[in-house]
Amino acid sequence: MLRGNIQALPAIMLGTMLFAGGVTAGDLFQPLVIGGQTVKWFPREDGRVVLTFAIARDDMTFEGAINCARIRSPRALLEKSAIDGVRFRQALSAAFGTWERAANVSFVEIEDPHKAQIVVGAQVETEGYAFSNVVPGARISNGFREISRAQVCLNPLRKWKLGFGGDLSIYDLKYTLTHEIGHAIGLDHPTGRGHLMSFRYSEKLDGLSGGDRAGAEYVYGARLQTRQTRDERDRAAANTHAMAN
Ligand SMILES: [Zn+2]
């Protein structure tokens, strides 16, 4: 149970705010801070945060990127681990869906990686297991700086798997992608263990912890069920109208 309303508190309080049982917010989740400021994707005019993503095809270079400066299609990475491209796509969409269900943020896959806000691919210069790169934009609102672009990159020299198998040297793609997407939407590593956003890879948790969900809600607010229902009604009405014409 939470003590007080976390969303009403400025981010600077996070490290010291006490949860029931003496756990601090920083143990549960940590907003990503770039240049001294928490960052998030800004909502559209209708209040919803809807982000486009695509899988890299050709080599892409991101000037000035700290991580994932050059990424390419994950084809060779998948072949090396004998993972089918369709199943990779399913894992990626499950990873985005995990965050989508947790807070007011949605993702739409598009074909052209050059037009996508989040690009997912394999590293060209290989390092570690996986990284994400978050590019801040110019706008600032309610204490957050906007995120303008993000990349998620996987090391193609590592072996990857789908699902857990107990061998912690081979990472599950869905878990890893969900973790990196967590960074791409503005979450950092909490100090506590046992969360999907915790630094260390683990197979104890299939999905988000309460802390991960609290982090997503802190940044984007609770999932807006009523608003979506209204949007869906509007769309249905527009379709009916289109058909009537
Ligand atoms: Zn991480």
Image (cartoon, rainbow, N blue to C red):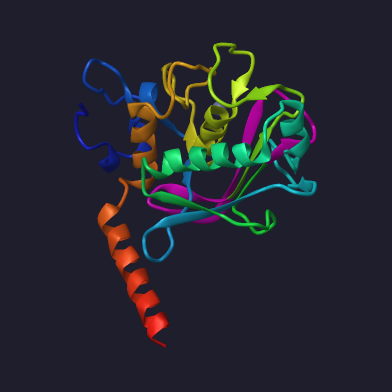
Residue 10, given in percent of the width and then of the height, sits at: 33, 39
Tell whether position 138 is magenta. Answer: yes
Residue 127, given in percent of the width and then of the height, sits at: 73, 25
Tell whether position 164 is magenta. Answer: no
Number of marks in picture: 0
As drawn, is 116 to the left or to the right of 57? left
In the image, residue 170 above or below residue 2:
above
| Magenta span dominant secondary structure | strand
Measuring 58% from the left and 27% from the top, which residue is drawn there? Answer: 162
Is 70 or 166 nearer to us in this picture?
166
Quadrant into which the N terminus falls = top left
As drawn, is 99 to the left or to the right of 181? left
- Magenta segment, which residues? 121-148
Residue 44, given in percent of the width and then of the height, sits at: 43, 62
Measuring 38% from the left and 46% from the top, which residue is drawn there? Answer: 220
Measuring 32% from the left and 58% from the top, which residue is drawn there? Answer: 228
As drawn, is 241 to the left or to the right of 93? left
Residue 226, given in percent of the width and then of the height, sits at: 25, 57
Is 81 or 39 nearer to us in this picture?
81
Q: Farthest residue toward the top?
A: 167
In this view of the protein, can residue 102 be seen by the observer? yes
In the image, residue 80 above or below residue 61:
above
Is 198 or 32 nearer to us in this picture?
198
Classify residue 167 by image quadrant.
top right
In the image, residue 209 above or below residue 48:
above
Quadrant into which the C terminus falls = bottom left
User: Ligand 1 sits in which quadrant?
Assistant: top right
In this view of the protein, can residue 34 be seen by the observer? no
Measuring 49% from the left and 42% from the top, which residue is drawn there? Answer: 96
